[in-house]
Image (cartoon, rainbow, N blue to C red):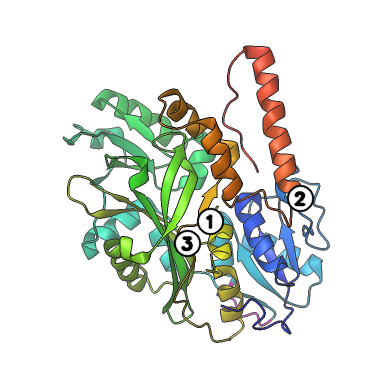
Amino acid sequence: MSVNRRAASQLPVVILSGGVTGLGVLRAFARQGIPAFVYPTALTDVLRHSRWYRALPGVDDRAPAPTPSVALLEKVLADSRLPGAFLCPCCDDWNRVVAEFAERPSGAFISMVPPRPALETLQNKANLATLLQTLGVPMPDTRMIDSSADISELPRSEDTFYFLKPRNSQSFRARFGTKGVRVRTVEEARRRLDEITFAHMSVVLQEYIPGSFAEHFFIDGYADHSGAIKALFARRRLRIYPPDFGNSTSMGSVPLSDVPGAVESVRRVLAAVNYRGIFSVEFKRDPRDGAFKLLEINARPWWFVDFAVRCGVDVCRMAYDDAQGCEVPALKTYSVGATCIFPYQDIFAMQPLVAARQTSWWRWLVEVTRALQPVGCTDDPMPGIVGTARVLTRALRNRLTHGAAPPLPVLE
């Protein structure tokens, strides 16, 4: 896919939300000379240190950002005085807002996001589970629960456990600081569920698929306005932190031939909801039956979107061109065997491996040197430098005050 295919087009991009995802999207467009503006970002966001960072005109980027809404989006676009733009949401809340905004005809501001019914199905874990069950797509055993009265017993599970999985991951993690809550007894499950419902949130009871974290695979890609899948990119998790409910800290690109069952599931699910836009689908291969079981779907750019772009799968440009009515050619190849490491978190994933003498810090340094990184890169070095300085400062402060390893660093 040629990055200069439509160099004459300079329709600006408005990136909604920041963090690691927003940084990856910003770089994807800026490296092609496409003007991009960001709204909103936290004051501590490393994205602000990017050489390409520009706040959306007419917006005070030092003020706390209000809750996303269509009314807010209309206001900030009006205040920006941009004659038009491509809207690229980088979090679930803004994705829903842009999907609603897109239903109101506006020739000036365009986007390529899934329709609202698709988002309502894919972002809500209960709705997604119902769809997968209907389609017969392999998935973990999932039970719908609304109150503690729905939990009379924990289902039997071979070599694993059950956990409470939020129907809305973004708000749940913001409230409880985790992606899921492991439960061992009926009493514990009921108590934790009461805490969750008291916070006006809901969950499902789901089996945790056993096996190594290296059995996690991701299928990323792009479906055009007609629903045709124009790109697929497969990657495998190599390390994770925190264990069980954490994020990938090290991964590698693999050929699609390694994950045929997962690819088929992606095609069936996206076709069932008339999907369009960027996506990332997570699977885990179950060692008990060898099936790739679908865990969740990100219906937008994801943390490691820059890795896909640098491997030749530029889903950001595909969405940009598609929204403007340009033909998006199907991608046939990408770089296989490339690695991506998020060192700020991977260092914690490495500690138990080094302690068990399964690897060494020297080998890790060599890996990091050769791998791509979602924050650190040579053509835009300041986010990586700032991120490293913050992690080292936090580690030193924690060591001096508590004599212990620092908590998980967060790069907003």
Q: Is residue 261 above or below residue 102?
A: above
Nearer to us in this view, 207 or 244: 244
Task: Provide the major secondary structure of the magenta segment.
Answer: loop
Percent x, y of residue 27: 68, 61
Q: Is residue 96 visible?
A: no
- In terms of secondary structure, where does tag 3 sit? loop
Q: Residue at x 22, y 63 (%)?
A: 134
The amino acid type of the residue labelled 2 equals: Arg
Q: Residue tagged by mark 2?
A: 48
The amino acid type of the residue labelled 1 equals: Trp
Instruction: Indicate which label's residue lies in the foreground, 3 or 1.
Output: 1
Locate residue 204 relative to residue 225 in the image: left or right: left
Instruction: Indicate which label's residue lies in the foreground, 3 or 2.
Output: 2
| Upstream in sequence: badge 1 or badge 2 | 2
Mark 1: few/some/many CA within 10 Å (<14, 14-19, 20+): some
Nearer to us in this view, 302 or 251: 251
Nearer to us in this view, 263 or 45: 263
| Upstream in sequence: badge 3 or badge 2 | 2
Locate residue 283 relative to residue 320 in the image: left or right: left
**Extent of the magenta region:** 102-107
Q: Residue tagged by mark 1?
A: 302
Q: Residue tagged by mark 3?
A: 299
Spatial separation of the CA atoms under disc 3 and disc 2: 25 Å
Could you tell me which quadrant the N terminus lies in?
bottom right
The amino acid type of the residue labelled 3 equals: Ala
Q: Is residue 1 above or below residue 215?
A: below
